[in-house]
Every structure is written in C-alpha cells, then in structure tokens.
Image (tube, grey):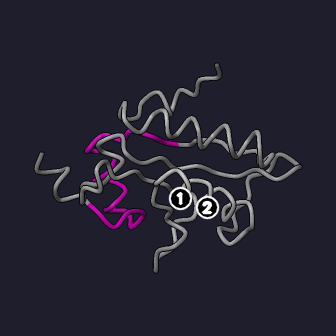
Amino acid sequence: AMTDPKIETLDPVFRPIAYMWLNAVRGDLGINVRVLEGLRDRDRQVALQAAGKSQVKVGWHNFGLALDFACLGTNGVYITDGGASEYELCGVEAEKLGCVWGGRWKMKDSGHIEYHPDGKTLAEVIGA
C-alpha cells in the first residue's frame, strides 16, 4: 500500500481515514493532491499564529488531527485558488469520511481538513 510521510505523522485514529481520503481523491476523483503538513509542533504553530497564518495558538495540527493539502492542475502547477472545484471535491470527500473541511468556514481554509475523534472539541482534546 502507498504511504505518505506527512500522513504517517498523524494520530493513529486519523491516519487510516486520511489514507482513505487520499486514495479516494487521487484514485476515484483523479485529483493530483499533495499532503503538505500533518503533525505540527507547538513552536511552528505559535510562529504561524504570530505571522497571521493561523487563528489559534494550539490547534488540531498539534495533535496530529489535521492535515493541509494542495491540489495541482494537469500542468503540475499548484492551484492557488481555494475556490477551485478540486478543493471542493476534496473537501466533500473528507466530509463523507467524518472530517471537517476548512472550506466551509467564514475564514476559508480550503486546503485543510481535520478530524474530531468522538466529536470532541479542541478544548477537550487540549485538556485530555
């Protein structure tokens, strides 16, 4: 089976879901998707928040429960428009697998999916 180094960093409960998602979007939908980041350490999270690239000081990435991805066009170039249909298709596929897609948020993050085990909130995961 295909492995992905970024998916390998994820929480063991999210990892198989992330692989199902990746196989579905690449295989069934034929979208050239690349996983950019999985687990993120606290220092990187704090730096991203300071740079205005994240809303939170501690987030789902810090627990290996989120991944960031990018879609590439047929030309192999990154699709930077988060409103592109490829991102929507990837997001819907993630939602089918019980994930939350950042493309639905007020501050859209179309290349982001996260998984909330047992429907836990971030506060519950941080407190666990």
Which range is magenta?
37-56
The residue indicated by pointer 2 is 92
Where does the image place residue 59, in percent across and percent down from the top left?
Answer: 30, 54
Q: Secondary structure at mark 2?
A: helix
Q: Residues within 10 Å of mark 2 (few under 14, many from 20)?
A: some
In three-dimensional space, the C-alpha distance between marks 1 and 2, rounded to whole angstroms, equals 5 Å
Q: Quadrant of the N terminus?
A: top right
Amino acid marked by disc 2 = Val
Q: Based on the picture, tell me whether residue 98 belongs to the magenta stretch.
A: no
From the viewer's perspective, tell me whether residue 61 is left or right of residue 69: left
Write the residue at 88% across / 50% down: 74
The residue indicated by pointer 1 is 95
Amino acid marked by disc 1 = Glu
Where does the image place residue 77, in percent across and percent down from the top left?
Answer: 80, 50
Q: Quadrant of the C terminus?
A: top left
From the viewer's perspective, tell me whether residue 9 is left or right of residue 121: right
Q: Residues within 10 Å of mark 1 (few under 14, many from 20)?
A: some
Residue 19 position by quadrant = top right
Dot 1 and dot 2 residues touching (CB under 8 Å) = yes
Total numbered labels = 2
Extreme-bottom residue of the structure? 106
Write the residue at 59% across / 23% down: 3
Give the camera-side residue of 126 and 121.
Answer: 121
Depicted 96 relative to depicted 83: above or below: above
Where does the image place residue 99, in percent across and percent down from the top left?
Answer: 46, 55
Depicted 34 relative to depicted 52: above or below: above
Where does the image place residue 38, in percent across and percent down from the top left?
Answer: 45, 40
Residue 81 position by quadrant = bottom right
Extreme-right residue of the structure? 75
Q: Secondary structure at mark 1?
A: helix
Extreme-left residue of the structure? 127
